[in-house]
Amino acid sequence: MLQIDLWKRLLIWTTVAVGLILAMPNTFYPRVEQHNDAVAAMELQGETPELLEQAAGWPSFLPSGLVNLGLDLRGGAHLLAEVQVDDVYAARLEALWPEVRDILRPERATIGTIRLQPSAADELRVRISQPENMARALELVRRLAQPVVSLTGALSNDLEVSADGSDIVVRLSEAEQIATDERTMLQSLEIIRRRIDEVGTREPTIQRQGSERILIQVPGIGSAAELKEIIGTTAQLTFQPVIGRGTDQNASPGVGNEILPSLDEGGIFYTLEQAPVVTGEELVDAQPAFDQNGRPAVNFRFNPTGARKFGDYTAANIGNPFAIVLDDEVISAPTIQSHIPGGSGIITGNFSVEESTQLAVLLRAGALPAGLEFLEERTIGPELGQDSIEAGRIATIIAFVAVLVFMGLSYGLFGIFANVALIVNIGLIFGLLSLIGATLTLPGIAGIVLTVGMAVDANVLIFERIREELKTAKGPARAIELGYEKALSAILDANITTFITAVILFVMGSGPVRGFAITLGLGILTSVFTAIFVTRLLIIMWFERRRPKTIEV
Amino acid sequence: MRLRLVKQGTNFDFFSRWKLWFGISAFLMALSFVSFFLQGLNYGIDFRGGTTIRTESAQPVDVGLYRDAIGVLGLGDVTISEVFDPTFGPEQNVAMVRIQAQEGEEAVSTAVIQQVEAALGEVVPDIQFVSVESVGPKVSGELIQTAAIAVVLAIGAVLIYIWLRFEWQFALGAVAALVHDVILTIGIFSELQIKFDLAIIAALLTIVGYSLNDTVVVFDRVRENLIKYKKKDLKEVLNISINETLSRTFMTSATTLLALIALFVLGGDVIRGFVFAMIWGVIVGTYSSIFVASAILLWLGVKRDWSKPTDTTGNQFSNVDA
């Protein structure tokens, strides 16, 4: 009657043991955190005695996953920024004007004078004095259009050229706008990430939200204003002549030169002339493209002054490499193939499509491509976070003890079984949170406290049912069995409905609310597991040993 | 000796005055509506936009002094309130300053925050700004929309689940109880003007979950007893079911309340509103699963012919009649 197979027993105990082992690092939080930080630092900078000592504070064969503390518990800054993707359209179209002028100029005999007209930000208007030959003008301008390159393949042209009276109107096509938006977002994310990484704080969150927003959370930073400043500073992009390439970081570069590391190739250093030929401030665009042989490449374009400097330099240095340097790291050092007069060029190399996309992103990463509008900003001081943790810890312990005592008083020995399950339950929640690297927030703590209160529900249902069955059933063993069996449907229904709301909270919520949904949802899973399997196993083990004739629940 | 919240074998008649209970619930809901439309909710910046600054200083908070210091900046509606909490130390004097979203500004203005911090720093030299939060009007509008959708979705999902697992009358009863709980919770937040922010939405959804938990347990027993007592009329079966589950209802409510009260008293002021909502929800949810959900079931009537073999009564989960 009352039986659980051996393999099931082992499975239950193993699950409990694994959960508790995973949860254990959290009881030594500061020590494990130091260990993890030291290990991460050694991966980046190599080993130092100090770091090794810190890493030794926690044995490496034990799990070292920790529950992340949310911003509201650790303190830090939170920003929600909206990227003004439209800014980029205007800049692109502005840069197009010289090209339109140059392509129309030889045909002035047929189309007359060419004049730029004031226009809305998302279009370029050029008036010609002989609109009767508009068709010819349109044909010429359309030649400027290029296929839109995206990871999914070329689909349509980037420009839409139309006539409006005597005006030629150039707009970015819809496909190009989407592609541009996407690029702008990727670039913005990349730039923000690079800049925050430079400050070197622990576990920053930089996430895209929706199509045009970026969520930035940095623990341990003084204020949101400080964070904004970090994001606002411009990274340096330069194009510098290459003198040599080697592996010695400490070689003497010579007067007016410098040695910089390569971004991708570890251990490779370039000797460069210090004075840049052109800087990133003069770059207006960079996009992934394909070269004549159909290999992935990156197209870039300078503004007029940049174009002149670049043209002169390339004319004089065909066959020489020059380096693209971002924040004192060499991104790539291609060889100049020919004189590049128009201010636009192509970087070829052994790229995959992803790499060329990435390089285009990096190339533009000097300056933020578009303005950021901050929709939400929060600063939480570390003291407040510490207070919240302290208050949460005390409240959880008191709640826990109160429930334990109450259950013991109400159900006697069976209450003790439920209490063991409850303790296991809390362990499992922390184990799961550590395993998935979830973030614990203040509402998340509330979720755990609520779980403490509600987790006993499944056991209460079972115990009440056993009491009822004791009145009618033939013996204690049968009553226990029936109690579990008949309470099951209520337990599952009740918990599935609560779980549904937890899932909806998780999907719809953000930040702290999401933290609450995670602990609530995990709490439901673990409490059902402990109530159905762990207490049952405990009760059966007790029953097998004692074989009581009567039981009191 | 066991602690018993409810003595064994109770036999209360919960439906002798069901019209009265209906009336009380309807009256309270009407009151909530009146309060909501007359006073409105005290929305936090999550939903209204604006800035809150939490200050802390060793010297006692003088709200008038703070108001004068900020008033000269001309920032429109500024609310200043002192925060009391048993967890604060003796040198810990906390105030919340709330500034409305600035006219015509979509984004959050750092300049405004710096002005306020400087002005306060002048009158209270040791003041610290332990948290500063700003939400632009654009986001706050979206947040309230998402929150409303979340609540509606949750209720909808539950309606469908219970419909599949039970019968449509059960689903209607459960959802009526949920709506009742949500309305009463919003009502008390409006009446007491407690700050209503994003966390409260989480609390609302938890209340939905809890209330449902309770209702489902009663319904599960009703379904079982409907098969067991084929001859008894519905009212009697409902009464038996509620009495049988009464002990469990009180036990679970008691443990949950114990935990929540500990959090309410000791958890700090930051989540006090959130915990209050849940305590209220547990009480209202327990009430509504008996006096709203079951009463509606009685009112609508249920199909009595559960054409299932009786020998599986205890384990209905294995035959989902979807």
Image (tube, grey):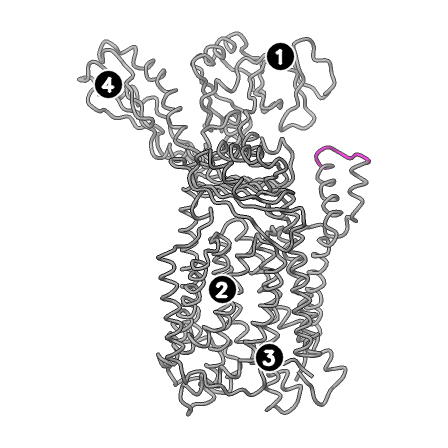
The one of A233 and A104 positioned closer to us in this rendering: A233
At x 49% / y 63%, what residue is drawn? A500
Q: Residue A209 versus residue B233: which sits nearer the camera?
A: B233
Q: Nearer the viewer, mark 1 or mark 4?
A: 1
Q: Which residues are magenta?
A: A43-49
Q: Which numbered marker is on residue A273? A: 1
Q: Residue at x 63, y 87 (%)?
A: A478
Out of A425 and B11, give the one closest to the viewer: B11
Q: Quadrant of residue B226?
A: bottom left
Where is residue B195? Give x, y as percent.
48, 53
Q: CA distance from mark 4 to mark 3?
A: 92 Å
In this rendering, which labeled residue sits more in front, label 1 or label 2? 2
Q: Which mark is residue B5?
A: 3
Numbered disc 4: secondary structure: helix
Chain of the residue under the numbered disc 2 shown in the image: B
Q: Residues within 10 Å of mark 4 (few under 14, many from 20)?
A: some
Secondary structure beneath dot 3 equals: loop
Q: Are marks 2 and 3 on the same chain?
A: yes
Q: Position of residue A57 (x, y in %)?
A: 80, 46
Provide the residue designation for mark 2. Answer: B207
Alpha carbon of mark 1 to alpha carbon of mark 3: how far?
85 Å
Asked whether the residues under the numbered discs 1 and 2 touch, taking CB atoms below 8 Å apart as contact, a structural biologist would say no
| Cβ atoms at labels 2 and 4 below 8 Å apart | no
Question: From the image, which quarter does the C terminus of chain B lie in?
Answer: bottom left
Name which residue type carries label 3. Answer: Leu
Q: What's the CA distance linking mark 2 and mark 3? A: 23 Å
Closer to us: mark 4 or mark 3? 3
Instruction: First in sequence, mark 2 or 3: give its number.
Output: 3
The chain letter for the residue carrying disc 3 is B
Side of A104 where B20 appears, left or right: right
> Which disc, if any, is residue A136?
4
Mark 1 belongs to chain: A
